[in-house]
Image (cartoon, rainbow, N blue to C red):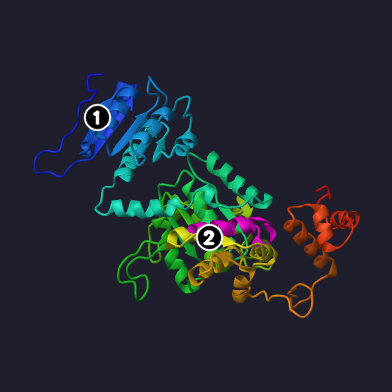
Amino acid sequence: MGSQGQSAASSGAGHARSHQILAAGADPTLLEAVRTRLADRGHEIVLIAGAAECIRRFSAEGADLVILCLPLGSGNGADVVRSLRDVDPRATIVITGHDEQIPSAAEAFNLDAFEYIEDPTKDMTDLLAAVGGALGSRRGDAQLRYLKQRDASGSSWSTLVGNSTEMREVVDVLRRVAERTTRGSAPTILIRGETGTGKGLLAKCSHYNGVRRNHAFVELNCAAIPATLLESELFGYERGAFTDARTARAGLFETAHLGTLFLDEIGSMSVDLQAKLLTSIEEKKIRRLGGRQSVLVDVQIIAASHTDLGEKVKNGAFRADLYHRLNVVSVTIPPLRKRGRDKLLLAETFIASMCREYGLPLRTLGEEARDYILEYNWPGNVRELRNQIERLLLLGNDGVIERSHFERQSNMPPPPSDRPGFSLILPEDGIGLEEVERELIRRALDRFDGNVSRAARYLKVTRQTLIYRIKKHRLGDGSG
């Protein structure tokens, strides 16, 4: 290739250093087209034929960005990406085309590519946008990228701690959606769950592990903003739209363009505003308050609610058409009280991460503290558990966290010392005896990891009696 190893643009004396880009591939026509378009933007680009030369050049001189135009001719794309990461784990890589190891965007993003473009020959605009996003074209973009990367670093699927069946099903659904929507638009997602179960974290994981991860993740709690201001926050406004509108302002839809807009507690949105939201989702355009022109927006909507939107539809408090539009992909995060030994996994994870964060010696959980975590109802869910752990670590000096430490700051009182028994919080509106028995059996099975014999001894009944009641309450087949 005549242009192999040749710089297409150089930074002359007295000028700021231009970005250096390595572009590797087997198609000289494509590489030349890439060189021409990027040189017009002032970038210094080196064209390379073959995988081995790409790795050698990157090892010797480094680069601000590597563009792999698959197929490479010699060497597979995934192997080259791994070799580049061995040289510099922070390497920024954009992948175009496909080969045996990287047949689609899913494989590219699994290799932590910054962006994937299926066919740059159709339109160089996507490639130019990817290069601009990777390198940054404004002063301060490096800081913005750092903040986004820091946000994304805590949003991998591995941060969703838990082995319970219900939690695994939730994660599996969203992972499948992310893997199957690696190109084009992304579906709306509805996340249900009680307050404190981690709906916001799940939304972030869905965004940062999907095709839109290099674009903005914008979140809005619809319950935290007065209804009169929510419309202007979402859609923006033009100058003079209302008394205090001295300048025009873009709304969160425009801010989230090409990215994700997370609408938490969407059930609190007024019915009138729901109609405008539905129109924006379906037509992919919005109109600012006081504006005459519509603005095209490409946004993935993830909505969340701790209330039953289906019931709100029946009561006329939520539009049925918007509910069905949001309910394309729906998951329900189980409350912490139903996640069995996930409680202990979460507690131990919080202890380890917070001890690192605060520079504290690692603490451990005593046996009775572990029992307490399994027994307690955790009405505030994961948020309550995390906050309790954080307080105990910051205010306590003991190397071992005991049950008494939790009880002193919890709403669950310890059993009275003058009589045996256990604490039971009765709801104001009453509860059925069958429901109490079912919950008691479920907790006993959770305590002993589903071992029926040990649960029967704990409940002071025969194994056959417990098996009968397990089947009666449809808690399993009693084979544990």
How many circles with numbers are drawn on the protein?
2
Q: Which residue is mark 1?
A: 46
Which residue occupies the foreground of this view, 450 or 394?
394
For image coordinates 66% across by 62% down, the residue present is 367
Q: Give the quadrant of residue 190.
A: bottom right
Highlighted range, magenta: 333-353
- Look at discs 1 and 2 and give the one toward the viewer: 2
Question: In the rendered view, would you say 46 is above or below 300?
Answer: above
Q: Tell me, yes or no, whether the two marked residues, 1 and 2, touch with CB atoms within 8 Å.
A: no
**Residue 245 is a magenta residue:** no
> Is any part of residue 271 visible from this angle?
no
Secondary structure, mark 2, is: helix
Which residue occupies the foreground of this view, 256 or 209?
209
Q: Amino acid at mark 2?
A: Ile
Secondary structure, mark 1, is: strand
- Where residue 13 appears, x then y in whole percent? 9, 40
Which residue occupies the foreground of this view, 245 or 476?
476
Q: How far apart in space, not on screen, are marks 1 and 2 (Cα)?
A: 48 Å
> Tag 2 or tag 1, which sits nearer the N-term?
1
> Is any part of residue 446 visible from this angle?
yes
Residue 254 falls left or right of residue 5 = right
- Where residue 448 appears, x then y in whole percent? 75, 55
The secondary structure that dominates the magenta segment is helix
Q: Quadrant of the N terminus?
A: top left
Q: Residues within 10 Å of mark 1 (few under 14, many from 20)?
A: many
Q: Which residue is mark 2?
A: 351
Residue 372 falls left or right of residue 144 = right
For image coordinates 48% across by 71% down, the residue present is 225
